[in-house]
Amino acid sequence: MSEFIDRLLSRLLIVVAFLAAASLVAQYGFFLHQRYSGLVIWLDRGIISFFIAENLIRLLISREKLVYLKTHWVDFAFIGFLATVVISLRFFPRSEIVSASLAKMDIRSVTKAYIIAVQVYIGSVLFLKTIDANRFVARLNLTAPQLVLVSFASVIGVGTLLLLMPRATATGHTMPFIDALFTAASATCVTGLIVVDTGSHFSRLGQGIILSLIQIGGIGIMSLVAFSAVAIGRGIGMRESAMMKDVLSFDFFGEITKMLRNIVVITGICELAGVLVLSRLWARDFATPMETVYYSLFHAVSAFCNAGFSLFTDSLEGFAGRVDVVLTFAALIVIGGLGFLVISNVMSVLLGRVRREKPGTRLSLHSRMVLISSAILLVGGTIVFFVLEAGNSMSSLPLDRQMLTAFFSSVTARTAGFSTMSMAALATPTALLMVLLMFIGASPGGTGGGVKTSTMTVLVATLRSILRGRPNVEFLRRGLPQDVVNKAICVVLLGFGLVFASTVAISIAEGRPLMDVFFEAVSAFGTVGLSRGITGDLTTPSKIVIIMTMFFGRIGPLTLALAIGQRTRETSYSYPVEGVMIG
């Protein structure tokens, strides 16, 4: 009997979850007539009643009630929260404390407060139910590369539909489908290329959707859902752990849960620190404290996720002379681009030294490779940019501003997308330098794109070994496996092929200078977001090409590496070896 009830509740849950999602979209995404608004409120009450009844019934039919309470504590916590809110509003509707709290939140009625409480509960429960969907996906016969592709494509699809809602755009603006798709793809792929101004074209709801897509795209939908399962005590099974091991490119199977926690904790700490610092720096730049916090939150998340989306029309050009603001953005961008594995490794080493553990944790070869290559690219990019542009676009700036602009341009070219100067003003040699930095991008396992710093380092080490006549590829007195070298070569070749194909396609559709088109294609592939001012004027075919380039640029190198890394069937034969001429 209990099994029948469980199956029945599971099937009803799918229907109710769909109705709850429709209710949220209808209320916040569309302008409803008052008559329909009342119907939606009654629908919300029915949905809430079902969720409460479902959890109570499952608790009653459960054989181990304490275990069920432990694994579903979030559901019952929200039920308790809802009950507290309803009781408070029922018995203390005219309380001065309640009235003052509602006024601060700009809530004019008790009914509105009730609806908000209901919607918060529904949204939270729906998110938790996606964990079961994740388990369903994990049971499908999908490889890790296929899972990455499907998850990103699904998020882009949902984001596109949400951005098409009437309330997602500001008053007087409309949103064509192609522009909604472009924006959703750019946000999910943490690129930052825009066809409409984010700050003026979208409402607060639309900007919130974009910010959510950025956060999901930066962390990764699979990592986010898997962490939620761990956080509320439901855990992830062996198959899910194996899948996440491939998705995260993590070698230690038993530490997947720890790595998931590190990803979310590092993201939360860095973004919170960014919000606090920017709120302090921008305290006098906005009319109200809430506006200051809102702008700080949006830009902190966008910077750490290397997205490049800004609510300012000119990106960060208005703050080009503010050293504190520019360096704060640079720190968030660099940390987000290093990769969660590297950050975790560095934190473990630092904690080990503070605790004086013997033997202490040491930096892995991957961490040292990423840190060294990132430092070389940042310093080298700054110097070359300064030399090339000091007498050109930066000739009117004082020396300190020139150095700051050169440094930030070197930082932001590594997939960030923010700018303190116009990219169209760059000379051709400088634009080519930016193209190289954008193509290389950030580091594996981070929030940035490109072919990755470690990939280029492996290729440089390979060239060095060949020129020295050594049979093995070496870096920092460590030998590199041949399969790693093969992956690096394939990633770079496929990346270059994608950029070349995109450049040719856009050049055919647009009558624009080749440098501008090439710059745009590399920016899309590296998920950078920098542009020489042609994105908003692209035709629909070119927008589709850029969307595809952003999508494959975000998941392509990773998907390729995972696909190559899978085991293949061994054969009992080999073909004769014959040499060919090279060079």
Image (tube, rainbow, N blue to C red):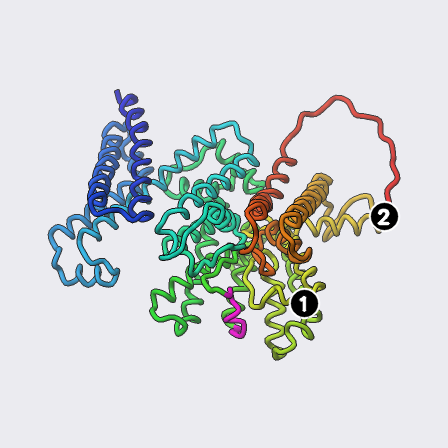
- 3D distance between C-alphas at marks 2 and 1: 34 Å
Position of the N terminus, as image quadrant, is top left
In the rendered structure, which amino acid carries the disc numbered 1?
Phe
Q: Position of residue 141 (x, y in %)?
A: 52, 27
Q: Which of the two residues, 566 or 384, is positioned nearer the viewer here?
A: 384
Q: Residues within 10 Å of mark 2 (few under 14, many from 20)?
A: few
Q: Which element carries disc 1, helix, strand or loop?
A: helix
Q: Residue at x 40, y 46 (%)?
A: 162
Looking at marks 2 and 1 on the same chain, the residue that comes earlier in the sequence is marked by: 1
Q: Residues within 10 Å of mark 1 (few under 14, many from 20)?
A: many
Provide the residue designation for mark 1: 385
Left or right of residue 315: residue 21: left
Q: Nearer the viewer, residue 437 or 350?
A: 437
Can residue 345 be seen by looking at this rendering?
Answer: no
- Label 2 vs label 1, nearer the camera: 1
Specify the quadrant that holds the C terminus.
top right
Front in this rendered view, residue 432 or 1: 432
318 falls in the magenta region: yes
Q: Is residue 330 visible?
A: yes
Q: Left or right of 494: which side holds 447?
A: left
Q: Is 538 located above or below residue 574 in the figure?
A: below
* Disc 2 secondary structure class: loop
Percent coordinates x, y for residue 508 in the rendering: 66, 47
| Residue 499: x %, y % from top left | 66, 48
Q: Is residue 342 left or right of residue 161?
A: right
Main SS, magenta residues: loop
Q: Which mark is residue 343?
A: none
User: What's the residue at 23%, 39% (across, down)?
Assistant: 43
Q: Is residue 418 magenta?
A: no
Q: Mark 2 = which residue?
A: 469
From which residue to which does the magenta span run? 314-323
Q: Residue furthest top?
A: 1
